[in-house]
C-alpha cells in the first residue's frame, strides 16, 4: 500500500520553558522545512510526561510552559493544517508501550546513555536519580515507534535516544517474531549550525544559564541582549585588532546572516582593527530582527486566540491517539496479549 511507504516524522520538546533561538537553529527551522516539503506525515509532540521525569514536584512549571511551547511552534511556522501537534500525556498508549519496552532493556544499558549521564551531572541528582528520568529514553522510543516514525529531526544530543530506540525496535521484532515496529533515523542540522553558544560565550544556550534570546522576546529586549554579548575581551579600543574566533557576535553572524560575503568583510575589518563592537552588534541585531520580527508577529496573533490554540492541541492529540492505539494493538497482538480475540 502506498500510504505504508510514506515517511513519518515525529519529534518533540520538553515543556520546561519558552523556546529560544538555539532551538530555532537546532531543530525548529528544520521541522518547518520538512513540513513544507509535503513529503511527510509530521507529528510534533509536547513532551510533558518526559518533562515530569525531573520536575515531578513542580508540574505547574510544565503546565505553564506547555502553552508557551505551542505558541513558539505556531510562531515559527509549524502549520496545524500540515503538522499534528500533540500532547504526550494525552496519549495513554505511550505509557503502556513504555512498560513493554522496559522489559527489553537492561539497567546497565540505560546507565551508559551519554546524554542522560551528562544531564544527571548537570542536574546534580547524585544518588537520587528519579527512576523515570533514567528510563526516559525508553519512553522516547515509545513516542517514536507509536507513530512508526522513520525520521526524527532533533539536535545532536538526541542521537543516543535514537540508537536506543533502534535497539528496542530490533529486539522487539526479533523476540516477538513480527515486524511490528519501525527503525527511525535521525535528521540533524548541518555541521556547525546546530548549536549556538549563549550570549555570554558559554558553549550552550540554556535557560538555567540565563544566556538566551527567546523567540518571544520583544525587540527592545533582543537589542539589549545583543548589546551585552560577549565579544573579544582583548578588543578594548576600536582601533585595536580584534579576534573573530570565539567571538560570539561573529559566531551568530556565521549562523544567521545569509550574506556571507558581508560577514567576511566585517571579519577582515575587525581583525585589522578599526571596527567597533557596537557596530557589529547593531548589524547582528538587524539580522536577528529580520528573523524574529515575523515570528513575534505570528506569535501575538495566536496568543490573542488561546481557545484556538487549545483546539489545535486537542484535535492533534485526538488524531495521535488513533494512530498510537493502533500500534499498541499490534504490539499486544505480537506479544500474545490478545486473549479474547
Ligand atoms: N528528548 C527531547 C528533548 O529533550 C524531547 C522528546 C520527547 C523527543 N520525545 C521525543 C524528541 C521524541 C524526539 C522524539 O528535547
Image (cartoon, rainbow, N blue to C red):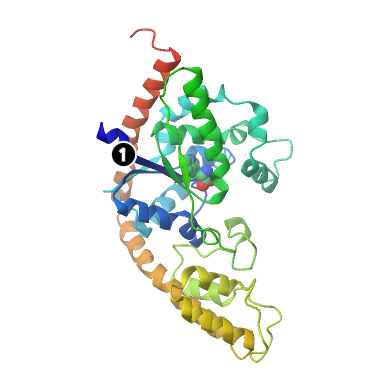
The 10 Å Cα crowd at callout 1, few under 14, some 14 to 19, many 20 or more, is: few
In the image, is 108 to the left or to the right of 137?
Answer: right
Where 218 falls versus 182 (above or below)? below
Where does residue 62 sit, x and y in percent of width and height? 50, 45
Instruction: Residue 336: name its quadrant.
Output: top left
Q: Say which of 127 and 8 sits in front.
A: 8
How many labels were placed on the picture? 1
Q: Say which of 276 and 91 sits in front.
A: 276
Where does residue 175 sit, x and y in percent of width and height? 51, 18
Where 331 falls versus 288 (above or below)? above
Which quadrant of the figure contains the N terminus?
top left
Instruction: Residue 275: name its quadrant.
Output: bottom right
Decide if residue 275 is in sight here. yes
Where does residue 242 sit, x and y in percent of width and height? 65, 83
Q: Say which of 107 and 215 sits in front.
A: 107
Asked which secondary structure carries label 1, the reply is loop
Where 18 falls versus 144 (above or below)? below
Q: Say which of 9 and 72 sits in front.
A: 9
Which quadrant of the figure contains the C terminus?
top left
In the displayed image of the protein, which residue is found farthest to the top? Answer: 340
The residue under the point 58% across, 41% down is 160
Q: Which residue in the structure is indicated by mark 1?
A: 6
Decide if residue 45 is in sight here. no
- Mark 1 CB within 8 Å of ligand 1: no
Where 31 falls versus 297 (above or below)? above
In the displayed image of the protein, which residue is found farthest to the right? Answer: 127
Where does residue 177 sit, x and y in percent of width and height? 45, 17
The residue under the point 68% across, 89% down is 240
The residue under the point 57% across, 37% down is 53
Amino acid at each position: 500500500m502506498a500510504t505504508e511507504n510514506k515517511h513519518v516524522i515525529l519529534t518533540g520538546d520538553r515543556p520546561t520553558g519558552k523556546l529560544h533561538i538555539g532551538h530555532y537553529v537546532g531543530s525548529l527551522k528544520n521541522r518547518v522545512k520538512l513540513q513544507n516539503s509535503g513529503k511527510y506525515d509530521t507529528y510534533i509532540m509536547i513532551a510533558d510526561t518526559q518533562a515530569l521525569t525531573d520536575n515531578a514536584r513542580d508540574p505547574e512549571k510544565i503546565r505553564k510552559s506547555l502553552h508557551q511551547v505551542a505558541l513558539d511552534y505556531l510562531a515559527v511556522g509549524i502549520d496545524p493544517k500540515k503538522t499534528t501537534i500533540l500532547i504526550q500525556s494525552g496519549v495513554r498508549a505511550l505509557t503502556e508501550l513504555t512498560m513493554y519496552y522496559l522489559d527489553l532493556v537492561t539497567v546497565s544499558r540505560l546507565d551508559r546513555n551519554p546524554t542522560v549521564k551528562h544531564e544527571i551531572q548537570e542536574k546534580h541528582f547524585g544518588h537520587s536519580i528519579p527512576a523515570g528520568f533514567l528510563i526516559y529514553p525508553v519512553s522516547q522510543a515509545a513516542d517514536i515507534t507509536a507513530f512508526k516514525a522513520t525520521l526524527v529531526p532533533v539536535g545532536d544530543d538526541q542521537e543516543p535516544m535514537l540508537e536506543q530506540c533502534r535497539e528496542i525496535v530490533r529486539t522487539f521484532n526479533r523476540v516477538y517474531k513480527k515486524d511490528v515496529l519501525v527503525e527511525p533515523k535521525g535528521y540533524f542540522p548541518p555541521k556547525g549550525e546546530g548549536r549556538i553558544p549563549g550570549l555570554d560565550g558559554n558553549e550552550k544556550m540554556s535557560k538555567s544559564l540565563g544566556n538566551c534570546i527567546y523567540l518571544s522576546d520583544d525587540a527592545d529586549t533582543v537589542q539589549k541582549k545583543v548589546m551585552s554579548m560577549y565579544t573579544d575581551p582583548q578588543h578594548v579600543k576600536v582601533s585595536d585588532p580584534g579576534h573573530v574566533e570565539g567571538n560570539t557576535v561573529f559566531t551568530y553572524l556565521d549562523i544567521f546572516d545569509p550574506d556571507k560575503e558581508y560577514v567576511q568583510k566585517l571579519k577582515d575589518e575587525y581583525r585589522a582593527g578599526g571596527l567597533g563592537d557596537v557596530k557589529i552588534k547593531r548589524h547582528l541585531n538587524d539580522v536577528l530582527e529580520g528573523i524574529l520580527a515575523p515570528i513575534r508577529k505570528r506569535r501575538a496573533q495566536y496568543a490573542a486566540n488561546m481557545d484556538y490554540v487549545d483546539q489545535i492541541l486537542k484535535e492533534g492529540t485526538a488524531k495521535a491517539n488513533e494512530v498510537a492505539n493502533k500500534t499498541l494493538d499490534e504490539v499486544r497482538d505480537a506479544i500474545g496479549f490478545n486473549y479474547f480475540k
